[in-house]
Amino acid sequence: MPTEILMPALSPTMEEGTLAKWLVKEGDTVSSGDLLAEIETDKATMEFEAVDEGVVGKILVAEGTEGVKVNTAIAVLLEDGESADDIGSAPAATPAVAPEPAKTPEAASAPAAAPAPAAPASADGTRVFASPLARRIASQKGLDLSAIKGSGPHGRIVKADVEKAEAAPAAKTAAPSAAAPAAAAPTGPSSDAIARMYEGREYEEIKLDGMRKTIAARLTEAKQTVPHFYLRRDIQLDALLEFRGTLNGQLADRGVKLSVNDFIIKACAIALQQVPDANAVWAGDRMLKLTPSDVAVAVAIEGGLFTPVLQDAHQKSLSALSAEMKDLATRARDRKLAPHEYQGGSFAISNLGMFGIDNFDAVINPPHGAILAVGAGVKKPVVGKDGELGVATVMSVTLSVDHRVIDGALGAQLLNAIKENLENPLAMLA
């Protein structure tokens, strides 16, 4: 029976994508693991691998097509002995629900390929990734896919996994209780109404790509649902700048050049260990308190931004953090990051100091507990410990905090730890 190849979900939050390029053509023979297509998500362009073997019988979605919903049929794969005549009239996209027309006797007697069952979910609601053929076989054998461990790419369940499994009753899913309808969120003027305001004025209409739509949705959600509060401190950088200059002179032969941002990443990672209760994220009905310091850093790219995550940043040397950050930033600008490289973390850093910005307030990226907004280091008059007036390089920072996760006093402890680490850089190496 022909097998539909479905638009994959290449990240847990992906709902649709652009089929950027086909890497196969009709008639090509493919095996599990072969590259089929390049898919553009809201964050990156990723290669899509085959999970079953067969011959590409028909391509249903042309390359360059935008807004292809996850689980939409994009191609048909034929097994041994099958031909294009077996495909029938496979739909090019998942149709909208519509009343079914009355069947004529001829139509009723015509054979039709059975559609693959809908993508299953485990008992906790997590989506189970399985190939269309694996889902069809599981349905015929009465198997619960959530109980089967996949051996395909990224844990995807393939035909062989289902054939090895013994029949078991499908897990029953409890019917969701009827929830009271939520009050509609206030909306602004429609796009047409706004366009009418500018009739007679020259402008360019810019179409929103997937990244811009995602940024708009997530940050709107963050400002509407995350109770932000803000803590501000000035940090003197002279000791750090002197120490950085010494280190860069010693590391020049190795091609290493540390930036101020590398020290900020390290200082925040250590601070999360010093104030472990602040190393947490909001998870709906609970909080998750992390053990490692996984720090995200905002990277500006054309048309948007990424927040790649440096895992276990507290355990890495400054030179290792510097090299990893440069690699992540380069691949972020090329949109070549894998989802696991920009998802996760409990804390983020957004640095606009290189643009001469003195200070600003950053928006928390859910589910993070906090984000540090970093301004430029500028020469300012300061009063020393001895009461004498002097000049120092001062950097203004603002810590945006999710009050559901971190209370005021705890946030203050975290920001004080970051300040102490940056003003005493030698201690970070202890």
Image (cartoon, helix red, strand yellow):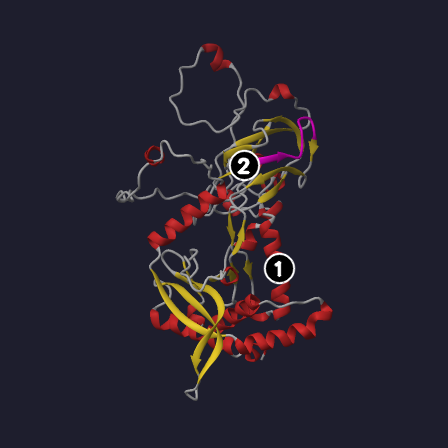
Q: Is residue 203 visible?
A: yes
Q: For the view shown, which residue lies furthest in the top direction? A: 105
Q: What element carries label 1?
A: helix
Q: Position of residue 397 (x, y in %)?
A: 44, 67
Magenta part of the chain: 19-28
Q: Which of marks 1 and 2 is nearer the N terminus?
A: 2
* Residue type at numbered disc 2: Thr
From the image, tell me which residue sits under label 1.
Answer: 326
Q: In this view, does 322 lie above or below 1?
A: below
What type of secondary structure mainly makes up the magenta span?
loop
User: Viewed as shown, does residue 171 lie left or right of 261?
Assistant: left
> Amino acid type of disc 1?
Lys
Q: Indicate left or right for 55 with 268 as reference.
A: right
Of residue 261 and residue 138, the one placed in the foreground of this image is 261
**Circle 2 is placed at which residue position?**
18
Q: Which residue is drawn at 41% across and 43% down?
A: 172
Residue 260 screen position, x and y as percent: 56, 68
Residue under the point 51% across and 34% down: 68
Q: Nearer the viewer, residue 292 or 126?
A: 292
Residue positioned 45% across, 67% down in the render: 279
Queried whether the magenta region covers residue 27, the answer comes back as yes
Q: In which quarter of the image is the C terminus?
A: bottom right
Location of residue 276 (image quadrant): bottom left
